[in-house]
């Protein structure tokens, strides 16, 4: 709160201004590119004794051959099978007091290590060795194929509701490679994967020019760049893979899929194609964040609209929620409602559509929108305290084309108005843009 006294000529005039000052620390970073094409970003954070090393590879399931899907995820497993000089990654990192993990999405494959800052070279040694000299042989491939096949069966085929995403992707996408989940289109694709298949995948995508390495933590930028150059500078300069993905045409009519499974409750999935996190223009980026806020309005916590309406007030559902797929190209806005026994799934669909229409016609209250913005800001601030979260965000926003989005994101969110919410709802929740999955009990 600031009080400002203003004195006018001839008489004193006191104006009391109440100014809300929002102080937000900016995430500082330094960026370089090695001669082999590796992009390197360093964020100094001396409030922690730790350091996070994040390597993002610009390859996801969307880059797979439609007849050989699941390779990006399979390869994530193979990357932990050891390299020429590091036969056991976990053991080497644990001896240095660290831990590591990885994940695969439709767009990217990401690997990260967190360890005491004085032991950072262990992480750089491990990552450089498997970027250059991964030890792939038939025995290791067979082991990981079996692991992934078992994962496919346990998580997607034998688990109640497990095949939902295997059904939704091809329902929503007819041309774009988002039409299959990261686990793959069919289990047979992994079963038939050959050693030459995975070696070609490695040689194509696991190169310095196709990677972004970010370090966040207790290290000086100059020292970090020196160490990265020491461990990665001699890696070969290979040309970056250039993708040419088919463009998914606009949806022109409502799509419906009904399946029956051995499950306890009927579940309704309403899916709408939404704009992706593509930075081709600022307007599109703002639309993405507006859609994300709309998802939170419908689904953030027990005070959210869907939970209050379907679970508390009308008592039609066990649970109700919304989510977005957060993809670079056009993604999915998914509303999920688990229906109470004895309740018609079609009645639930009607109630949800009426609620969506009310947002289209009346938008939302300013107080409701501000509550969600505050919750998002709190969550983002907590994330920024973690070096692992910062290192990933800096890598990901660099891939998108704007590293400084890590500092601009909240400003974009704050600029979103109730009118913006209404406009996105009107564009998004159209019948012709709807795909419905009725997941029914046998």
Image (cartoon, grey):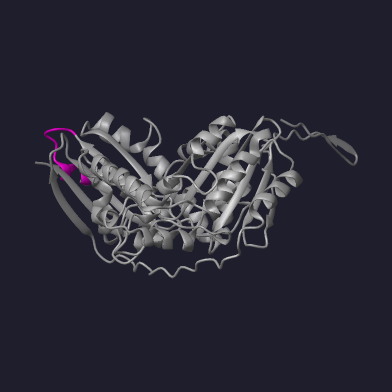
User: Residue 272: image x %, image y %?
Assistant: 32, 54
Quarter of the image with the C terminus in it: top left
User: Residue 305: image x %, image y %?
Assistant: 35, 37
Q: Is residue 269 magenta?
A: no
Q: Quadrant of residue 92?
A: top right
Quarter of the image with the N terminus in it: top right
User: Residue 45: image x %, image y %?
Assistant: 69, 36
Seen in the picture, residue 65 relative to 115 is either above or below; the reply is: below
**Residue that extends furthest to the left in the rendered view of this protein:** 442
In this image, 264 relative to 165: left or right? left
How many marks the image carries: the answer is: 0
Q: Is residue 415 visible?
A: no
In this image, 23 relative to 423: left or right? right
Q: Is residue 341 magenta?
A: yes
- Residue 312 versus residue 4: which sits nearer the camera? 312
- What residue is at 68 percent from the left and 38 percent from the top? 25
Instruction: Write down the region rendered in magenta.
Output: 340-349
User: Residue 441: image x %, image y %?
Assistant: 12, 40
Q: Is residue 175 visible?
A: yes
- Residue 174 versus residue 111: which sits nearer the camera? 111
- What residue is at 25 percent from the left and 55 percent from the top? 186
In this image, 197 relative to 21: left or right? left
Seen in the picture, residue 262 relative to 105 is either above or below; the reply is: above
């Amino acid at each position: 709160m600031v009080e400002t006294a203003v004195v006018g000529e001839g008489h004193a005039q006191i104006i009391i201004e109440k100014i809300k000052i929002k102080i937000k620390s900016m995430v500082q970073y330094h960026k370089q590119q090695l001669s082999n094409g590796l992009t390197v970003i360093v964020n100094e954070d001396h409030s922690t004794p730790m350091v996070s090393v994040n390597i993002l590879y610009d390859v996801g399931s969307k880059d797979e051959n439609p007849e050989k899907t699941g390779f990006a995820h399979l390869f994530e497993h193979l990357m932990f099978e050891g390299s020429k000089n590091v036969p056991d990654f976990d053991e080497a990192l644990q001896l240095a007091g660290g831990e590591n993990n990885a994940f695969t999405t439709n767009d990217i494959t990401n690997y990260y290590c967190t360890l005491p800052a004085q032991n950072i070279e262990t992480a750089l040694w491990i990552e450089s060795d498997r970027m250059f000299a991964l030890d792939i042989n038939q025995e290791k491939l067979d082991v990981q194929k079996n692991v992934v096949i078992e994962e496919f069966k346990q998580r997607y085929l034998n688990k109640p509701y497990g095949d939902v995403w295997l059904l939704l992707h091809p329902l929503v996408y007819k041309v774009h490679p988002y039409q299959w989940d990261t686990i793959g289109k069919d289990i047979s694709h992994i079963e038939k994967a050959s050693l030459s298949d995975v070696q070609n995948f490695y040689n194509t995508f696991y190169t310095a020019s196709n990677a972004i390495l970010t370090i966040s933590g207790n290290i000086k930028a100059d020292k970090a760049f020196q160490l990265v150059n020491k461990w990665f500078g001699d890696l070969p300069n290979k040309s970056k893979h250039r993708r040419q993905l088919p463009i998914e045409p606009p949806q022109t009519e409502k799509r419906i899929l009904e399946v029956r499974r051995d499950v306890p409750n009927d579940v309704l999935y309403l899916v709408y194609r939404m704009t992706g996190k593509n930075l081709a223009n600022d307007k599109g980026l703002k639309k993405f964040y507006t859609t994300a806020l709309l998802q939170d309005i419908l689904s953030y916590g027990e005070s959210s609209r869907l939970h209050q309406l379907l679970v508390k007030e009308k008592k039609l559902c066990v649970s109700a929620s919304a989510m977005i797929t957060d993809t670079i190209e056009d993604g999915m806005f998914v509303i999920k409602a688990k229906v109470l026994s004895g309740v018609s799934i079609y009645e639930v669909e009607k109630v949800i559509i009426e609620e969506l229409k009310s947002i289209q016609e009346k938008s939302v209250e300013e107080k409701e929108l501000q509550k969600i913005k505050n919750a998002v800001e709190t969550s983002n601030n907590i994330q920024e305290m973690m070096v692992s979260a910062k290192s990933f965000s800096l890598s990901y926003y660099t891939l998108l084309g704007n590293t400084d989005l890590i500092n601009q994101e909240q400003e974009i969110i704050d600029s979103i108005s109730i009118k913006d919410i209404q406009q996105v709802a009107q564009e998004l929740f159209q019948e012709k843009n709807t795909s419905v999955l009725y997941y029914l009990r046998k």
